[in-house]
Amino acid sequence: MAAGCSACDACSACGACAACSGCNPCAAACGGCNPCAAACGGCNPCAAGCGACGGCGACGGCGAGADIELSNEEAQAAYDCIRGQLQAGYAKADLVSSDGSDVSGQYMDWGVFNTVAYKSWTHGGRFVNNFANGVAAASYGTMEEGGAMPVGSVLAKDSFAVTGKGMVVPGPLFVMEKMPGGFNADSEDWRYTLVMPNGKIIGTTDGAGSGNVAFCIDCHVYAERDSMLFIPEEYRN
C-alpha cells in the first residue's frame, strides 16, 4: 500500500490502494456515481459498448467489473468497505414497492440469501448480494423447487465492481417486484428497476425509462423458474 494512503485502508482487501488516486471510491468526496466520469449516462450499464471512460465506463462505478477474482474473505472485506456508500447512494432514489414500502433505503434489512458477495456475469461481472423482502423470503429460499413467486415479492441485488487496479467501486442496485397478473406478459409480471449508485433511477418496466431495463427482461426470461436467476449453489445460505 502506498505511503500516506490511510483514507483507503478499509478498501485494501484486493489492493485497492496500490496507488492513492485523486478519487478514493470509498471516500464521501467521490460521490455515488462514476469516479472516473463527470456524470452517469443513461446507457445500459451492463453492456460492454458503453465506452471505456464515459458515464457508464468500465473504469468507474457505473461500468462493468474487470475480470478480477476475489477469495471469499476478500469479497467480504470489499463489501464491508463499500456497503455504507451503496446504502447512502441508493437511498437517494426513494424507491418504494407497489405497497409503499421503502426498497432502496431498507433492502439491507431484508433477508440475504448468499453467504458472501459473488461475481455475476449476467450483471456485468460485478460482485452482487441477493436480498428478498418478507413476501418473497419463504418462496425464494426454496430456489429451484418450482412455482411462481407471490405477488408483492421484491428481490434486490446490490453490486460493486473491482477495477483492474484493484479499486472497489459502487455498482447499480437491481430490483425486481412481482406484480399482479396482467402487468406485463413479456416480463412474467415482474417490474424491473435499475438504480445507479448516485440514486438516479435509470428505468422501470412500464414506467419512465422502460426501454433502459428491457435487457433485464431479455435475460431473465430464459430462467427455468419465474424469470429468476438463482444464486450459485456454493454461495447459498
Image (spheres, rainbow, N blue to C red):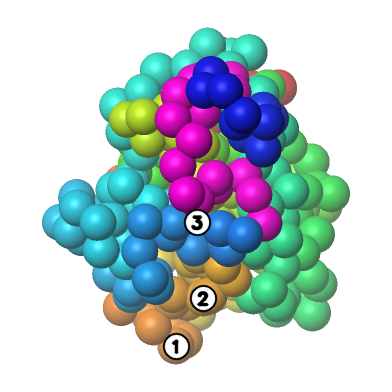
Q: Which residues are magenta?
A: 11-28
* Quarter holding residue 37: bottom left
Q: Judging from the image, what secondary structure is the residue with disc 2 in?
A: strand
Calculate the distance from the C-alpha at mark 1 to the C-alpha at mark 2.
Answer: 9 Å
Q: Which mark is residue 121?
A: none
Q: Is residue 24 magenta?
A: yes
* Quarter holding residue 44: bottom left
Q: Position of residue 197 (x, y in %)?
A: 54, 61
Specify whether 135 is left or right of 202.
right
Residue under label 2, please give it.
Answer: 201
Is 52 drawn above or below residue 91 in the view shown? above
Q: Position of residue 172 (x, y in %)?
A: 50, 56
Q: Judging from the image, what secondary structure is the residue with disc 3 in?
A: loop
Calculate the distance from the C-alpha at mark 2 to the C-alpha at mark 3.
Answer: 10 Å
User: Among all residues in the image, which is located at the extreme front?
Assistant: 4
Is 225 drawn above or below residue 41 in the view shown? above
24, 119: nearer the viewer:
24
237, 20: nearer the viewer:
20
Confirm whether residue 46 shows in the render: no
Residue under label 1, please give it.
Answer: 208
Circle nearer the viewer, 3 or 1: 3
Calculate the distance from the C-alpha at mark 3 to the C-alpha at mark 1.
Answer: 17 Å
Q: Amino acid at mark 3?
A: Pro
Specify whether 150 is left or right of 53.
right
Tell me which residue sits at (44%, 75%) in the image: 202
Q: Position of residue 16 (x, y in %)?
A: 50, 28
User: Among all residues in the image, which is located at the extreme bottom?
Assistant: 208
Label whose residue precedes the other's in the sequence (2 or 3): 3
Q: Confirm or deny contact between disc 1 and disc 2 (CB under 8 A).
A: yes
16, 126: nearer the viewer:
16
Q: Judging from the image, what secondary structure is the residue with disc 1 in?
A: loop
